[in-house]
């Protein structure tokens, strides 16, 4: 946040959220929270505060609750789990945190232990995302291309459409994109 009006808007939004959730925070505490949250884009923080008001029980409001709810482009844990590949044939475009969590559960997936794999993935993913958000690390999407070359195109096209990869990056990954994808890559 860069402007004084953004700071004022943030302090007001924090105050309203505190009031609605029954949190008893001093003015000094609200200002410290606002200072910590000022490092994030105002729109993300306001969205996180809205989620706090909708999701938190009374008295559970905290700085960590706001940071956990920032929409920084990372998928939620369940969506992230649904996106990971189940074999080496499948391509994926994933975040660094998804890749790290996948490394923890990959052997379980290989032997068909999907329930413990899911639990390990989600726990690890949540922890990695929390660290990244606390350290204000921007989301980074990278492709992991599987053995099925025909499946790559769909995954890469989706990543371009969602703004996760650039057209130039995807153009380098496909040997000769079909005509309709060439139009998208221009």
Image (cartoon, rainbow, N blue to C red):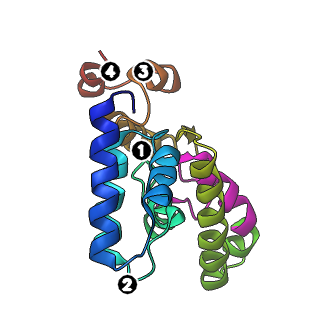
Instruction: Identify the magenta region.
Output: 83-105
Whichever of labels 4 and 1 marks the residue nearer the N terminus, that label is 1
Whichever of labels 4 and 2 marks the residue nearer the N terminus, that label is 2
Q: CA distance from mark 1 to mark 2?
A: 38 Å
Q: CA distance from mark 3 to mark 1?
A: 16 Å
Q: CA distance from mark 4 to mark 1?
A: 14 Å
Q: Is residue 78 above or below residue 171?
A: below
Residue at image mark 2: 57
Q: Position of residue 31 (x, y in %)?
A: 45, 51
Residue in the picture at 62% in, 52% down: 97
Whichever of labels 3 and 4 marks the residue nearer the N terminus, that label is 3
Question: Which of the two discs, 1 and 2, sits closer to the camera?
Answer: 2
Residue 173 magenta: no
Q: Is residue 65 above or below residue 94?
A: below
Q: Position of residue 53 (x, y in %)?
A: 30, 71
Residue in the picture at 43% in, 64% down: 79
Residue at image mark 4: 185
Residue at image mark 1: 155
Q: Residues within 10 Å of mark 4 (few under 14, many from 20)?
A: some
Q: Secondary structure beneath disc 2?
A: loop
Q: Position of residue 160 (x, y in %)?
A: 36, 33
Can residue 92 be seen here?
no
Q: Are marks 3 and 4 in contact (CB under 8 Å)?
A: no
Q: Residues within 10 Å of mark 3 (few under 14, many from 20)?
A: few
Question: Is 49 in front, or is 87?
Answer: 49
Q: Is residue 27 above or below residue 183?
A: below
Q: Secondary structure beneath disc 1?
A: helix
Outermost front residue: 27
Can residue 30 be seen here?
yes
* Rendered-image quadrant of the N terminus: top left
Whichever of labels 3 and 1 marks the residue nearer the N terminus, that label is 1
Residue 98 magenta: yes
């Amino acid at each position: 946040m860069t402007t004084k009006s953004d700071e004022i808007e943030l302090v007001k939004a924090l105050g309203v959220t505190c009031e609605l959730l029954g949190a008893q925070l001093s003015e000094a505490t609200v200002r410290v929270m606002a200072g910590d949250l000022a490092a994030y884009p105002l729109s993300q923080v306001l969205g996180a505060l809205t989620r706090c008001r909708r999701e938190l029980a009374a008295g559970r409001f905290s700085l960590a609750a706001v940071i956990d709810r920032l929409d920084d482009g990372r998928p939620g844990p369940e969506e992230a789990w649904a996106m990971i590949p189940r074999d080496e044939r499948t391509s994926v475009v994933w975040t660094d945190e998804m890749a790290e969590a996948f490394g923890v559960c990959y052997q379980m997936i290989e032997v068909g232990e999907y329930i413990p794999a899911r639990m390990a993935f989600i726990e690890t993913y949540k922890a990695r995302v929390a660290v990244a958000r606390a350290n204000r690390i921007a989301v980074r999407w990278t492709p992991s291309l599987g053995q099925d070359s025909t499946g790559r195109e769909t995954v890469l096209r989706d990543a371009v459409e969602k703004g996760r990869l650039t057209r130039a990056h995807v153009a380098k990954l496909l040997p000769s994109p079909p005509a309709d994808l060439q139009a998208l890559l221009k």
